[in-house]
Image (cartoon, rainbow, N blue to C red):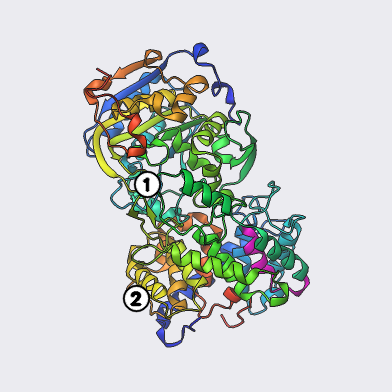
Amino acid sequence: MRKPDIALVPSFQRTASRVAIRRAVNYQQDLPAVIYQTLRVFELPVKGKTVLLKPNLVGFDPLCEMNTHPYVIAATRESFLRLGAAQVLIGDGPAMDRDTEAIIESVRLREFAGPLGGIFVDLNLDDVKRVVLSTHASRLNELYLPKTALGVDFLVSMPKLKTHHWAGVTLSLKNMFGIVPGSCYGWPKNVLHWAGIDKSILDINAALRPDFAIVDGIVGMEGNGPIQGTPKPCGVLVLGDDPVAVDATCCRVMGLRPEKVKYLNAAGTLLGHVDAAKIQQLGETVASVRTPFAVLDEFKELREPEGGVWN
Amino acid sequence: MTPAGDSLDSQHLLSESAFAAKLCLPLIRSAQNADGGWGFQAGLQSRVEPTCWAILALRAHESTASSGEIPARGLEFLQKAQLANGSWPAAAEESSGSWVTVLACWVLAADAQAREAVAAGVKWICNDWPHDSATWRRWRARLFSHRNITEQNDSYRGWGWTPHTSSWVEPTSLALILLASTPGDLLPKGAARRRELARCMLYDRMCPGGGWNCGNPMVYGVAGEPLIVPTVWALLALRDEPKRPEFVMSLDWLERNIGNARGAASLALARIGMEAGGRKWPQGATTIAEMYSRNEFLQNIAVASWACLASCPRHEWLTGGVAEFC
């Protein structure tokens, strides 16, 4: 069982986080090389370990507009194996459709990652274990979570860069909704909505904080995301050892203010860094890749002031 | 339900039936745990949902029906898993009931000795009102919500996946299928009204061009895309009104989209839905066996069970009966 020792640390006690922004203009680029070289910089403790990649596979998507692109997933898997990981699993629990196979076939994951037997875990159907939620951000006192996700040595959240019609943005923290099993909570996992999306995000990530995050921002989604939005080319991969810092950086890339995203602002107190001064930026600068994303009117306060603030 | 009869491609069905007998049934049989139940995959902990699907599949394919030892041990598992309030939990450790109560009642209804258990389960189901359409919530939404996000009639009420949350298409459809076949003396007072509200909810939640998704046909004014799995369950729940325009439109949608099925679960359920609507299975459509060769159903026992159920020419399992002729 992974220890929650890195989950809850007050921001002032937490060392600086590292976030790398890499340019990748399209999905034809040599992504395994880009991702492998970037991961090496982080010197991650994965040799001989079991790694779980948790992409965002939210729905049936032949054009791969809403899901993490399978090439990014496959390139990341290959990179972790090159880094010496003993086993690299891919797992998700799609929220809206219980035919997980239909989703992974619609995005052609098998074509990119090879046969999925023994590699892909449907987290909706895995054995579960009761986890007491110590943070009490939401009114949920406990959740039943998949044993595979709880048991791996290294967990990587791999969302797509998207706006979200209820949460503002959906990135590596919100992506963790996908570990909550549909077989217990349904399709969608409505109990999380009732407990408050922002608060549930905090509880879930405090219970099972990703060790690393890789955001597919090559083509993101703006507007009425996470499903019905508009594809938005952004040409970046954002990688980092602190999911909060990665999400905050992604917001800045999207021309949004992370401290105005309710759950992200709260996560900045105990789960990671939102403050740019506490984030060591690697690779490209935010300003050089900044691509303003449209948001619904409900979230207009997230937008950066005219001209942006990240130069 | 319209019997398959003439409308069915019998040769296709035969090959699906042979595939079920040769591969799916042995897979299901061999995956049974020592406690009598099934997990979602061989070797995983027994859960109510896969246990129910496995029993239904085995019953539908075994001439000895529920007298078979394997289903009998499954029934024992189910009876032991029932909670004191009459419901069933989705996972063994859970102490509260969930939507799987519908499935457990469905399966146990064929067992005369489980009558009390079923009555308690049905009572729990009928007393479980979702909170999204509670009067106080509807008033609050009208007073404080500045934008109607989902544009649906919130006075209709179905069932949720978990107690005290919102109504969704699949649990509502499954509950309706159960209640339609539950003997009147087991139904609590008010069950008829609940059924009517739930049917209205399903029609109200249909996607604009027919078919259903999880239950959000419009979000912020944008039409949602239907999905095969919820569409089939809704069609099965509403199949006693086969001429109603919504039913026909949704069946049309299903027929048009069989070619887009990418998973064995969708394909198997689509087959059941098409037969329920009396439609012919399209020539040249992907077979479940072909679908198996891609990912081996991801070893999912529920999907293997649906594949078995899809290969039966008649679907007594939908009405609590036992098919003896598969």
Q: Which residue is mark 2?
A: B282
Structural distance between the alpha carbons of marks 2 and 1: 30 Å
Camera sees residue B262: yes
Q: Image point 42% across, 77% down: which residue?
A: B244
* Magenta stretch: includes residue B106: yes
- Using the image, determine if residue A115 lies above or below residue B314: above
Residue B108 relative to residue A111: left or right: right
- State if disc 1 and disc 2 touch (CB < 8 Å): no
Nearest the eye: A193 or B312? A193
Q: Nearer the viewer, residue B274 or B121?
A: B121
Image quadrant holding the N terminus of chain A, namely top right
> Given the image, on which type of amino acid does mark 1 rest?
Gly
Q: Quadrant of the C terminus of chain A?
A: top left
In magenta stretch: residue B145: no
Q: Give residue B13's quadrant in the image.
A: bottom left
| Viewer-closest of A225 and A72 | A225
Amino acid at the residue labelled 2: Pro
Q: Is residue B24 visible?
A: no
Give me the chain letter of mark 1: A
**Residue, disc 1:** A114
Q: On the picture, is B40 further left or further right than B281?
A: right
- Please tell me how crowded label 1 is: few (under 14), some (14-19), or many (20+) other residues with Cα within 10 Å: few
Q: Quadrant of residue B289?
A: bottom left
Between tags 2 and 1, which lies in front?
2
Is residue A281 rendered to the left or right of residue B265? left
